[in-house]
């Protein structure tokens, strides 16, 4: 993946190759501890392990592959530079990094709001096999259009809970919300998406 190639330029090739298999067997938290000691191989293992899921999150939020890769590259680069920002006693690495990437996406959206959704947009998977069936393509387009009508916080809530399959409590922690506030946010988001989907169907009749 291009992102992994860019990030690993931060370290030397010999360091990346050293103990690669051993790194892959370690937990995220153990890898972070090694990164704090300057272990480049641990950093590479962590990037390879998690870049895909966080890239998907950034893509759904930003709808632009280059912007998503730039945001994720910055997030991982900051992790390499300041691994001490993660505290193992405060929770899982994945939840903490979801919060890091989510906040970076929201910051990017505040700086540069999204342009109108292009015709035929596919939010993440643009491989030919994913577009084989016309029905599936239409459904993706309709959902993407409905997502585009949400505000940034609603979009993030829907992405975390329904695309990344996180529990509502974990998503609430990532977004810094109480459970009731998170549930209310999801209700409003679902209601807005329902209206958008109905309007889209009516316009296509």
Image (spheres, rainbow, N blue to C red):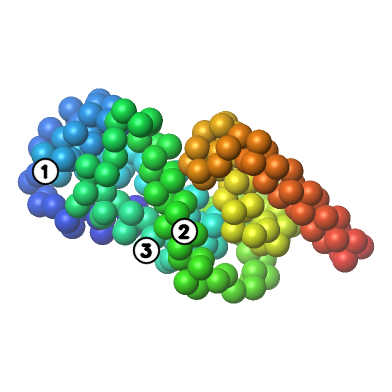
Q: Position of residue 174 (x, y in %)?
A: 48, 41
Please name the residue that numbered disc 2 is placed on.
Answer: 105
Question: Disc 3 on helix, strand or loop?
Answer: helix
- Can residue 139 be seen by looking at this rendering? no
Task: For marks 3 and 2, give the one nearer the viewer.
Answer: 2
Which residue is found at the position 22% from the left and 34% from the top? 31
Question: Looking at this view, is 177 or 124 the one in front?
Answer: 177
Q: Is residue 158 above or below residue 115?
A: above
Q: Quadrant of residue 18?
A: top left
Q: Are marks 3 and 2 in contact (CB under 8 Å)?
A: no
Q: Is residue 195 left or right of residue 81?
A: right
Task: Tell which circle, 3 or 1, labels the residue nearer the N-terminal end.
Answer: 1
Circle 3 residues within 10 Å: few <14, some 14–19, many ≥20: few
Q: Position of residue 83 (x, y in %)?
A: 23, 44
Give the Cα separation between the discs numbered 1 and 2: 27 Å
Which residue is found at the position 25% from the left and 25% from the top? 25
Q: Is residue 3 above or below residue 90?
A: below
Please name the residue that numbered disc 3 is placed on.
Answer: 70
Q: Position of residue 115 (x, y in %)?
A: 59, 74
Question: Disc 2 on helix, strand or loop?
Answer: helix
Task: For marks 3 and 1, give the one nearer the viewer.
Answer: 1
Which residue is found at the position 35% from the left and 35% from the top? 93
Question: Looking at this view, is 190 or 62 the one in front?
Answer: 190
Q: Are marks 3 and 1 in contact (CB under 8 Å)?
A: no
Q: Which mark is residue 38?
A: 1
Q: Quadrant of residue 142?
A: bottom right
Which residue is found at the position 42% from the left and 57% from the top? 104
Q: Is residue 143 left or right of residue 57?
A: right
């Amino acid at each position: 993946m291009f992102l992994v190639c860019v990030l690993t330029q931060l370290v030397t090739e010999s360091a990346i190759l050293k103990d690669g298999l051993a790194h892959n067997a370690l937990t995220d938290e153990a890898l972070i501890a090694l990164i704090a000691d300057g272990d480049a191989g641990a950093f590479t293992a962590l990037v390879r392990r998690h870049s895909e899921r966080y890239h998907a999150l950034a893509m759904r939020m930003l709808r632009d592959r280059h912007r998503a890769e730039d945001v994720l590259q910055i997030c991982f680069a900051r992790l390499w530079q300041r691994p001490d920002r993660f505290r193992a006693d405060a929770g899982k690495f994945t939840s903490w990094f979801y919060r890091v990437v989510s906040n970076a996406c929201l910051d990017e959206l505040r700086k540069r709001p999204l342009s109108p959704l292009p015709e035929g947009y596919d939010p993440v998977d643009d491989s030919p096999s994913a577009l084989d069936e016309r029905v599936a393509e239409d459904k993706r387009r309709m959902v993407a259009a409905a997502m585009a009508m949400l505000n940034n916080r609603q979009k993030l809530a829907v992405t975390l809970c329904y695309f990344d399959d996180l529990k509502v409590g974990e998503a609430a922690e990532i977004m810094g919300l109480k459970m009731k506030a998170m549930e209310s946010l999801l209700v409003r988001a679902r209601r807005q998406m329902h209206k958008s989907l109905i309007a889209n169907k009516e316009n296509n009749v």
